[in-house]
Image (spheres, grey):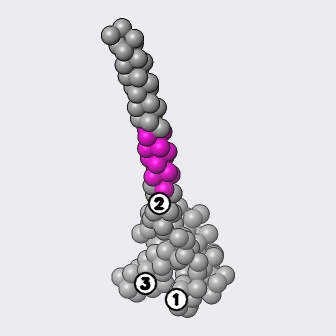
């Protein structure tokens, strides 16, 4: 998952939890909602806090997060979609396939030409033999 999508999910979970509980969500609540490990949640929260998107609040018993600047998410890098890479690979495969098909057609045409030349040679030899005997 790219940083952009991860940030949107993290902030969306924070908003939903804040709406339902009325308080800033803890990392445990966020991670439970997103079905991720606490370590992954803390790493994501730390990255977003470093970028100024969320604010990390710690007390002796918990770590909580608050939304600081959600617009900052739009500045995060987005990975190219797999479809783009897949379509590029598909185009390359199709180009290679066309090239191979042309090569096969060329080889078949050459074989047909050789076969025709061989038949003509056999026919001339037969005519010559038939002419010698007759």
- The correct choice, above or below, for 45 with respect to 91 in the image is below
Marked residue nearer the N-terminal end (3 or 2): 3
| Disc 1 secondary structure class | helix
Q: Nearer the viewer, mark 3 or mark 1?
A: 1
Label located before the other in sequence (1 or 2): 1
The magenta-colored residue range is: 95-109
The answer to whether residue 134 is left or right of residue 48 is left
Q: Is residue 20 left or right of residue 87?
A: left
Could you tell me what secondary structure mostly forms the magenta stretch?
helix
Res 15 label: 3
Residue occupying image coordinates x 53% and y 70% = 80
Q: Considering only order in the chain, which callout, 1 or 3, is on the residue closer to the N terminus?
A: 3
Q: Position of residue 55 (x, y in %)?
A: 59, 85
Tag 1 and tag 2, C-beta contact below 8 Å: no
Q: Report which residue position mark 1 lands on.
A: 70
- Residue 45 location, quadrant: bottom right
Note whether residue 115 is visible. no
Mark 3 vs mark 2: in front = 2
């Amino acid at each position: 998952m790219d940083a952009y999508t991860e940030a949107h999910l993290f902030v969306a979970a924070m908003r939903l939890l804040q709406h339902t509980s009325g308080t800033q969500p803890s990392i445990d609540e966020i991670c439970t909602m997103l079905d991720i490990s606490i370590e992954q949640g803390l790493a994501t929260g730390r990255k977003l806090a470093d970028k100024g998107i969320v604010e990390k609040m710690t007390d002796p018993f918990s770590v909580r997060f608050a939304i600081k600047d959600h617009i900052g998410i739009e500045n995060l890098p987005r990975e190219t979609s797999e479809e783009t890479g897949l379509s590029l690979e598909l185009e390359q495969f199709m180009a290679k396939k066309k090239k191979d098909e042309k090569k096969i057609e060329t080889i078949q045409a050459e074989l047909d030409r050789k076969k025709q030349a061989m038949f003509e040679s056999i026919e001339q030899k037969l005519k010559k033999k038939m002419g010698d005997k007759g």
